[in-house]
Image: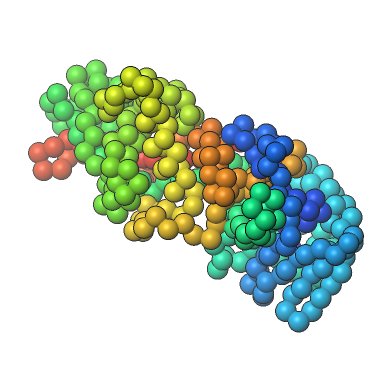
């Protein structure tokens, strides 16, 4: 029997839903449909560990090819099964569960998994008909679901630590011990405030991981410093929404850009960063700027609607990322940040970057 969590079951829901709909709706920055951007679906491709399934249409039927086998199922059945699975997912409890009705249906065309193969870079590939150009591009998507818990865009690790030097003060060993022992719920913020009360200043040095540092500089040479400013603002205020952080940083203008003509320096650079993270850049690997096969996201909304965000429509995709992400605090003990430590004669303090989608 197939079992999985809401995020995993959302993959098979997406497959059933978009095949039943026969079209994709593009979304705007606020998770609303863009009515003028509708993409008719020509074919859907889904790769599992046992092979690739190809779904296409003929009149009122879905034609399914799997290896040398072919199956024909009425489109209306995909509608019904998607609706039934959605109702179940909205009320399902527990971290892992099964859904016999859906499993029986997909077994009709020998589908044996609710998740795409981990060996492919996209959860699903869709061939659309572009009515503007007459072309039929193959678009790769990663599926992100609001039916379960919010997923991460950038996972925390020691590779996402930013190193700051404590200047303008002299802290004794006892001062350091007292500050590092602060264990309140907001301990990172409280430790920073304790440093500030000692007249200390956190002066950004560089990301802890050299590869991540160079990846950021490849996207934009200002990015390491810009992200360090955003991190410090996040850890010293109650602002976590990326859009709000960018708006605040833009007003402060710590990089001293010429904003007399209202150039959107900060939002532009952060959008490029979020876009590259979404499309393949990871902190620990050298980033060349080449996007992988996953060119965008299919967002499963909590009401079951599915919206398309793709590099194919880059402006909408980047606006969505900016408006629907937040910074959050990961485990400080696991990832080695949030405390004062010595290196040579310097006192250092690390802050960690993790980005999660809004629910």
Task: Judge from the rendering whether residue 113 lies leftward or rightward of residue 291; answer left or right.
Answer: right
Q: How is the image coloured?
A: rainbow
Question: Along the line of sight, which residue is nearer the eye, 63 or 4?
Answer: 63
Q: Quadrant of residue 71?
A: bottom right
Residue that protrudes farthest toward the left in the picture: 345
Task: Judge from the rendering whether residue 178 lies leftward or rightward of residue 111; answer left or right.
Answer: left
| Residue 332 coordinates in the image, percent (x, y) | 37, 40
| Residue 92 coordinates in the image, percent (x, y) | 76, 45
| Residue 252 coordinates in the image, percent (x, y) | 33, 20
The N terminus: image quadrant: bottom right
Q: Quadrant of residue 267?
A: top left
In the image, residue 244 sits, relative to residue 329, either above or below, namely: above
The C terminus: image quadrant: top right
Answer yes or no: is residue 1 visible: no
Question: Along the line of sight, which residue is nearer the eye, 92 or 259?
Answer: 259
Residue under the image location 65 percent in, 46 percent down: 308
Answer yes or no: is residue 304 visible: yes
Residue under the image location 88 percent in, 62 percent down: 59
Task: Judge from the rendering whether residue 34 lies leftward or rightward of residue 246; answer left or right.
Answer: right
Q: Quadrant of residue 49?
A: bottom right
């Amino acid at each position: 029997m197939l079992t999985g969590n809401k995020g995993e079951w959302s993959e098979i829901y997406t497959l059933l839903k978009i095949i039943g709909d026969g079209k994709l709706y593009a979304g705007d920055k606020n998770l609303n449909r863009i009515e003028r951007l509708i993409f008719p679906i020509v074919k859907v491709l889904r790769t599992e560990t046992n092979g690739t399934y190809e779904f296409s249409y003929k009149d009122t039927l879905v034609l399914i090819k799997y290896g040398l086998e072919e199956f024909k199922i009425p489109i209306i059945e995909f509608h019904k099964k998607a609706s039934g699975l959605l109702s179940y997912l909205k009320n399902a409890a527990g971290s892992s569960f099964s859904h016999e009705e859906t499993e029986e249906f997909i077994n009709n065309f020998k589908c044996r998994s609710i998740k795409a193969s981990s060996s492919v870079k996209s959860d699903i590939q869709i061939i659309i008909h572009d009515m503007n150009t007459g072309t039929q591009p193959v678009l790769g998507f990663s599926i992100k679901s609001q039916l379960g818990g919010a997923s991460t865009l950038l996972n925390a690790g020691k590779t996402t630590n930013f190193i700051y030097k404590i200047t303008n003060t002299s802290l004794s060993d006892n001062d350091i011990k007292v500050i590092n022992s602060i264990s309140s719920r907001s301990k990172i913020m409280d430790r920073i405030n304790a440093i500030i009360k000692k007249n200390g200043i956190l002066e950004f040095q560089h990301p802890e991981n050299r590869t991540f540092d160079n990846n950021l500089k490849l996207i934009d040479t200002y990015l390491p410093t810009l992200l360090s400013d955003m991190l410090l603002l996040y850890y010293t205020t109650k602002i976590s929404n990326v859009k709000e952080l960018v708006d605040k940083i833009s007003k402060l203008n710590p990089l001293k850009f010429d904003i007399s003509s209202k150039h959107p320096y900060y939002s532009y650079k952060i959008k490029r960063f979020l876009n590259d993270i979404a499309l393949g850049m990871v902190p620990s690997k050298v980033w060349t700027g080449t996007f992988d096969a996953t060119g965008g996201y299919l967002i499963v909304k909590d009401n079951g609607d599915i919206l398309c965000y793709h590099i194919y429509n880059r402006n909408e995709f980047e606006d969505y990322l900016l408006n629907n992400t937040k910074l959050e605090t990961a485990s400080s003990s696991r990832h080695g940040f949030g405390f004062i430590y010595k290196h040579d004669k310097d006192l250092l303090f690390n802050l960690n970057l993790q980005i999660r989608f809004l629910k």
